[in-house]
Image (spheres, grey):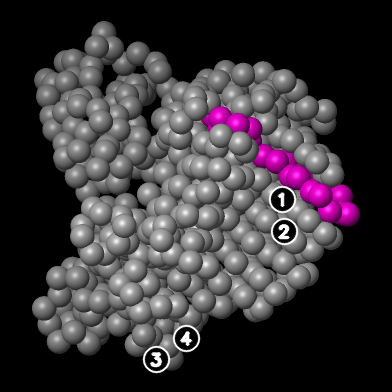
Amino acid sequence: MKNYLQPHLLSLVFGLFFLLPAPAFSLYTNYYVKASATGAGDGSSWTNAFTNLQVAIDAASVGDTICVAAGTYLPTHRHTGDSLRHSTFYINKDIAVYGGFSGEPGTEGSSAGRDPKLFVTTLSGDLGIPGDTIDNSFHVVFIDHVSDTMRLDGFHITDGNTFGGGGLETYGAGIYADAFAGRCNPVIANCTIRDNHADQSGGGIAFYAELGGVSRPTLLNCHIIRNIAGGGGGMMGYVDSDGMIYPMMINCYFQGNTARTAQGSAMSFIVHSATSVPQIINCVVTGNHSPTSSAVDIFLTGTGLAQPTIINSVFSGNNNGSFRVSSIGTVESNIEVRNSIFWNNGFGHGLTTNNAVAHVTNSIMQNSFEGEGNLASDPLFVEQPSSQGTPHTNGDVHLLPGSPAIDAGDNGAVPADIVVDAAGLPRFVNVNTGEPGGIVDIGAFEYQEAITSTKSIFKTLEWSVYPTPAIDVVNLNLPSSDTDSQLDVWSVNGTKLWSTKVGPEQTNMQIKVDRWPAGMYLIAVSTHGNTDVRKFNIEK
């Protein structure tokens, strides 16, 4: 069986769905943070929680865990300067920081009361005048020379703004991770990094590895959406002097990001006589916009070498191409693409190279691409993302019944530890039985009939979900049925958020959605073994 990831990297995947902090053992401490706590303020429980997250970070020692209750938190640590805008959440030690807790007393030390989607925990750079970005933080989070035992998990990171800064303050508005002449290898999991603006590069995230630094970050189940920068709208990496940048991205979404003037609307890597080895697995890269460049751009000089690997991912609806490796140096780079879809991007598939060679197999490539098992057929997405000339988060790249991507992948190209798709559902599903096993599908999602079926379940399909977009509630208008029906709400990445049964004569109901983040959702009604689906959007 083939494996396209180096064996020592596979161990990083074990933490993919680890959402909960470890129990408090004698060697380590759990600290608690809750904005509304009114107790002793020593961080020992939800009642006595710290109200300031930075205080907890400063109090924690290596190996400790910080649990943060739902709410909005503002940074207070001044780093690289004394102005209010230099305030950041500063992490320079190997600790674990988890958001998404209810903060309910009595749930300390356990998984009870943690759901990052329900209990939204926001780290916001919106300092000074609320809603006015001119006085926002240069970096919402600053991660400084940590190992891969440092974990940031379950947060919304938003409203960073580097405009008006100088030097490094112009990069990494959401997160800045510093490996200057050293290492910085954080694990960032289950985070939404959105609506951050950088003057230069790295609107959402910047990984810096100057003077031979080594940056090996791992991003798991993250949404990097609607960030803006000169280049690297969603994320950027910079490395030089024989250093290495080695980001691993698993089950991540890069959507609606913008590069205003330079390269890489979703991601940009600049490599000067160094090495860049990004790993993109089970990822969705759609609706990113640049007037000049592809969604992902790797630019190399000197002896710069790029060896990106793309497995079971989707690039679609990116207006100016999908993926580009361009070198003006002396070394030929290699791109490996397996089980992936490049469709409806600018310039066809949008995969372009200069002094690089692309090896593509078992993939769907618009306008075709030479390689074993490659197809050039419409992948039949549930909703094709538009390649319009503006950034957007529209579209749904789940597969429809009959898609040529179903059972067309190569099982040997999937790393051994990847057992689920981008929605957290089984990665190998038998298309005929719906049971685990079988041939892997091409793309980020395994075909799951339960959430993509369009079979009729009512005498008429005239049922509706409104308003869309919604803010606080959605209303359902259902036709009468002859039996009970099951009603489920799913996030667009396949996580079930809400479920109930409705009786035969129940035709109207209301669902509160004010605690769910902005984005697209699916609502499914099931009866008699069949399912019908509607979509709705939430705006904040």
Bin the neighbour count of mark 4 within 10 Å (Cα to Cα): few under 14, some 14-19, many 20 and up.
some
Which residue carries the number 2 mark? 271
Between circles 3 and 1, the one closer to the viewer is 1
**Cβ atoms at labels 2 and 4 below 8 Å apart:** no
Report whether residue 22 is seen: no
Is 94 located above or below residue 167 in the figure? below
- Identify the secondary structure beneath mark 3: loop
Q: Position of residue 405 (x, y in %)?
A: 63, 27
Between circles 3 and 4, the one closer to the viewer is 4
Bin the neighbour count of mark 2 within 10 Å (Cα to Cα): few under 14, some 14-19, many 20 and up.
many
**Cβ atoms at labels 3 and 1 below 8 Å apart:** no
Is 53 located above or below residue 454 in the figure? below
Q: Position of residue 269 (x, y in %)?
A: 65, 54
Which residue carries the number 1 mark? 299
Between circles 3 and 2, the one closer to the viewer is 2
- The answer to whether residue 404 is left or right of residue 133 is right
Mark nearer the N terminus (3 vs 1) = 3
Q: Nearer the viewer, residue 472 or 6?
A: 472
Mark nearer the N terminus (1 vs 2) = 2
Q: Residue at x 39, y 16 (%)?
A: 455
**Cβ atoms at labels 1 and 2 below 8 Å apart:** yes
Magenta highlight range:
316-337
- The answer to whether residue 499 is left or right of residue 61 is left
Which residue carries the number 3 mark? 26
Which residue carries the number 4 mark? 62
The kind of residue on which mark 4 rests is Val
**Cβ atoms at labels 4 and 1 below 8 Å apart:** no
Mark nearer the N terminus (3 vs 2) = 3
